[in-house]
Image (cartoon, helix red, strand yellow):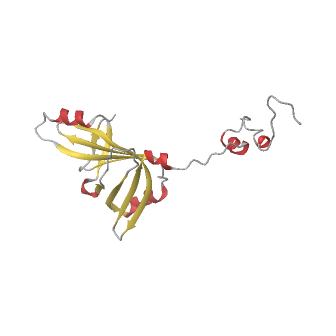
């Protein structure tokens, strides 16, 4: 479980050496890919993270006073070409992505700083290695998307096949109703 950043820092202040790091969780259908900016494997909060060292870069994450959908970019470079097939074949759009900030002292502890969904992946392949840039967008971006829902029987049946609540909506379109008076 992720915790508050202030609590993570406060817990680490008593350690003799403190090393800050970032960690990333990327949710794919085949499982969660967990990377951290250190070297080697590290168990953090009960989960195993693979060290990406300087090969993992995280762009600036903006925080504003307004309710605004901001994004970030993760860049993973120096990837062997055989691992590229995973990036090319695995569905990733709209899958969860989380960025954590943590401190390694006597124990590693971290707090979640950004929750997002994977959006666009750009792959630059070279003869030996490749670079993958993954754009992630804040979940608030859903507030900016148009909702294409109609109050029609066809739309309702596509989502809820057994629901008959909108069955007569079309017949009411130009229907003249007489309320409290006699028709002429």
Asked if 136 appears above or below 122 in the picture, the reply is above
Judge by depth and name the residue closer to the eye, 134 or 168. 168
Q: Which residue ends up furthest to the top in the rendered image? A: 180
Q: In which quadrant of the rendered view does residue 108 lie?
A: top left
Asked if 97 appears above or below 87 in the picture, the reply is above
Locate the N terminus and report the quarter of the image it occupies: top left
> Going 68% across and 45% down the picture, which residue do you hit?
155
In this rendering, position of residue 128 left or right of residue 149 = left
Judge by depth and name the residue closer to the eye, 32 or 122. 122
Locate the C terminus and report the quarter of the image it occupies: top right
Q: Which residue ends up furthest to the left in the rendered image? A: 16
Judge by depth and name the residue closer to the eye, 71 or 37. 71
Q: Is residue 29 visible?
A: no
Residue 44 in percent (x, y) is at 28, 39
- The mark total stands at 0
Residue 50 in percent (x, y) is at 30, 48
Judge by depth and name the residue closer to the eye, 9 or 52. 9
In this rendering, position of residue 50 left or right of residue 90 = left
Residue 81 in percent (x, y) is at 38, 64
Q: In which quadrant of the rendered view does residue 58 lie?
A: bottom left
> Going 39% across and 56% down the picture, which residue do you hit?
134
Asked if 182 appears above or below 95 in the picture, the reply is above
Q: Which residue ends up furthest to the bottom in the rendered image? A: 127
> Going 26% across and 50% down the picture, which residue do you hit?
37
Q: Is residue 122 visible?
A: yes
Asked if 73 appears above or below 96 in the picture, the reply is below
Residue 24 in percent (x, y) is at 33, 47
Q: In which quadrant of the rendered view does residue 12 lie?
A: top left
């Amino acid at each position: 479980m992720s915790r508050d950043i202030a609590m993570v820092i406060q817990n680490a202040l008593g350690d003799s050496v403190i090393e800050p790091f970032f960690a990333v969780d990327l949710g794919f259908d085949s499982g969660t890919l967990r990377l951290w900016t250190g070297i080697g494997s590290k168990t953090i909060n009960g989960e195993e993270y693979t060290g990406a060292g300087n090969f993992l870069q995280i762009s600036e994450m903006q925080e504003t006073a307004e309710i605004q959908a901001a994004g970030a970019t993760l860049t993973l470079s120096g990837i062997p070409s055989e691992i590229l097939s995973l990036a090319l074949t695995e569905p990733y759009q709209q899958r969860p992505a989380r960025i954590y900030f943590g401190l390694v002292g006597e124990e590693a502890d971290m707090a979640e700083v950004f929750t997002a969904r994977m959006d666009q992946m750009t792959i630059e392949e070279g003869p030996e290695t490749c670079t993958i840039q993954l754009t992630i967008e804040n979940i608030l971006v859903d507030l900016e998307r148009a909702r294409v829902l109609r109050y029609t029987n066809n739309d309702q049946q596509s989502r809820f096949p057994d629901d008959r609540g909108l069955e007569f909506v079309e017949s009411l379109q130009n229907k003249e109703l007489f309320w409290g008076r006699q028709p002429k």
